[in-house]
Image (cartoon, rainbow, N blue to C red):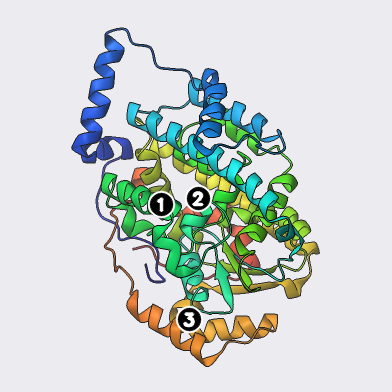
């Protein structure tokens, strides 16, 4: 994991999909092959859109619950299902993964609604001064998240509770929880299907995870269009009011924290930059840590990461089109965040440059804690240093890619992010 979250590069092909198709595991190739034969014999692919009622009923049957809460989530679900039918390039295996994920999201939504009923007092508890880690992916956000998780005064959103939220049980009970076991199994399967993903972004069931999972229950998140080619969903999603989704995000955190003593939340998700105005409305006392790094160094790596996830779902991928989308998407995300910050309270923000985080992470965090008026204990500093020593750069290997395979040029990337790099005085890093 480490701080330099950018994988090493090596010569590659022009289209990611061609190379990735050769790396598919044998069971996946056999599964896809068998379904293609059935298709040629006349078997029609089932429609996602027509499966809406059966998806909802299956979730009810699996949980024994029937209250999905506010029906507004159905709008997003329907747009998504239609986009899967009309636009996605899902392989048979990818279709199966999507079906399983949609079922899991619906089950989690039912469970959260039931959890609020069982723990009505949970919604009365505050979420005080949460720390949000924001920044371009590959700019040190993941390592920073793990470092802050070492402070006992902080709490993070563990992967298994992000995927299936509920009141957090005592640590010694986790491994017996079916939700925890399901998370372990799911991650093991994902890394079996593509071991290279572990080098790009390692996740563990008990480790801190991005809070994007909480938005999935509203069917308002870029996870869906990062895993599949569904531009109509993207267009619809980007026009939506995110306030209800952020309010649900906050209330799910209240449910998760309800059994234990109050601790400070540390949450991480780069896409919060796109919705920074809404985030500050729902969390008015939020403490924002924004990491900074030369975008020309991280953008090709981001494209490689997105291509890696999408390669698990889709049969064909235009890596150049994917890169154009990421260039525009991330460029606009950074510009929107700058617009919001122009009128926001400066004291709510702490800017942390990647080079400072690499040079001395604990000193950087001491400065951040002092900025927000938090205390960083000697024990927390010791734990942070120990984590840093256990997780050197490249611990889980490298991930080969080239800038050229995504059709990106240094000049084009520099120009797209010029206002951002000038605003935060981000030094250029020499290309490798």
Cα distance, mark 3 to mark 2? Answer: 29 Å
Q: Is residue 70 left or right of residue 401?
A: right
- For residue 183, which numbered disc appears in the image? 1
Q: Residue at x 47, y 71 (%)?
A: 146
Q: Position of residue 418 (x, y in %)?
A: 59, 58
Front-most of 144 and 352? 144
The residue tagged 3 is 361
Front-most of 272 and 217? 217
Q: Residue at x 71, y 34 (%)?
A: 72
Dot 1 falls on a residue whose secondary structure is helix
Height in image: 170 above or below 251?
below
User: Pointers 1 and 2 in contact (CB under 8 A)?
Assistant: yes
Q: Is residue 396 left or right of residue 321?
A: left
Cα distance, mark 1 to mark 2? Answer: 8 Å
- For residue 163, which numbered disc appears in the image? 2
Give the position of the N terminus as an image quadrant.
Answer: bottom left
């Amino acid at each position: 994991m480490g701080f330099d979250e950018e994988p090493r590069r090596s010569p590659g092909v022009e289209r990611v999909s061609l190379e990735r198709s050769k790396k598919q595991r044998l069971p996946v190739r056999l599964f896809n092959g068998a379904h293609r034969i059935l298709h040629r014999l006349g078997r029609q692919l089932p429609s996602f859109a027509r499966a809406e009622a059966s998806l909802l009923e299956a979730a009810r049957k699996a949980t024994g619950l029937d209250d999905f809460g506010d029906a507004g989530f159905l709008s997003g679900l329907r747009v998504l299902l239609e986009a899967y039918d009309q636009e996605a390039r899902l392989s048979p295996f990818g279709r199966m993964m999507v079906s399983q994920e949609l079922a899991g999201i619906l089950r989690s939504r039912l469970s959260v609604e039931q959890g609020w009923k069982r723990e009505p007092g949970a919604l009365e508890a505050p979420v005080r001064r949460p720390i949000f880690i924001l920044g371009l992916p590959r700019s040190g956000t993941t390592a920073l998240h793990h470092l802050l998780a070492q402070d006992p005064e902080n709490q993070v959103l563990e992967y298994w509770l992000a995927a299936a939220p509920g009141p957090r049980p005592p640590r010694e009970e986790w491994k017996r929880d079916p939700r925890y076991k399901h998370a372990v199994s799911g991650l093991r399967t994902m890394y079996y299907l593509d071991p290279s993903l572990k080098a790009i972004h390692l996740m563990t069931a008990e480790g801190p995870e991005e809070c994007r999972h909480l938005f999935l229950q509203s069917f308002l998140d870029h996870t869906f269009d990062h895993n599949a080619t569904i531009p109509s969903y993207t267009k619809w999603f980007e026009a939506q009011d995110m306030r209800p989704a952020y309010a649900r995000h906050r209330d799910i955190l209240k449910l998760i924290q309800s059994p234990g003593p109050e601790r400070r939340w540390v949450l991480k998700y780069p896409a919060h930059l796109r919705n920074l105005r809404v985030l500050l409305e729902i969390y008015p006392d939020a403490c924002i840590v924004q990491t900074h790094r030369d975008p020309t160094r991280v953008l090709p790596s981001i494209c490689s990461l997105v291509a890696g996830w999408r390669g698990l779902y889709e049969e064909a991928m235009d890596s150049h089109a994917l890169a154009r989308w990421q260039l525009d998407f991330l460029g606009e995300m950074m510009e929107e965040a700058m617009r919001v910050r122009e009128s926001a309270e400066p004291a709510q923000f702490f800017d942390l440059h990647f080079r400072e985080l690499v040079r001395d992470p604990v000193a950087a965090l001491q400065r951040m804690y002092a900025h927000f008026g938090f205390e960083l204990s000697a024990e927390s500093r010791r734990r942070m240093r120990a984590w840093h020593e256990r997780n050197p750069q490249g611990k889980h290997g490298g991930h080969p890619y080239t800038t050229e395979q995504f059709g990106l040029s240094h000049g084009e990337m520099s120009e797209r992010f010029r206002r951002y790099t000038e605003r935060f005085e981000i030094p250029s890093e020499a290309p490798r």
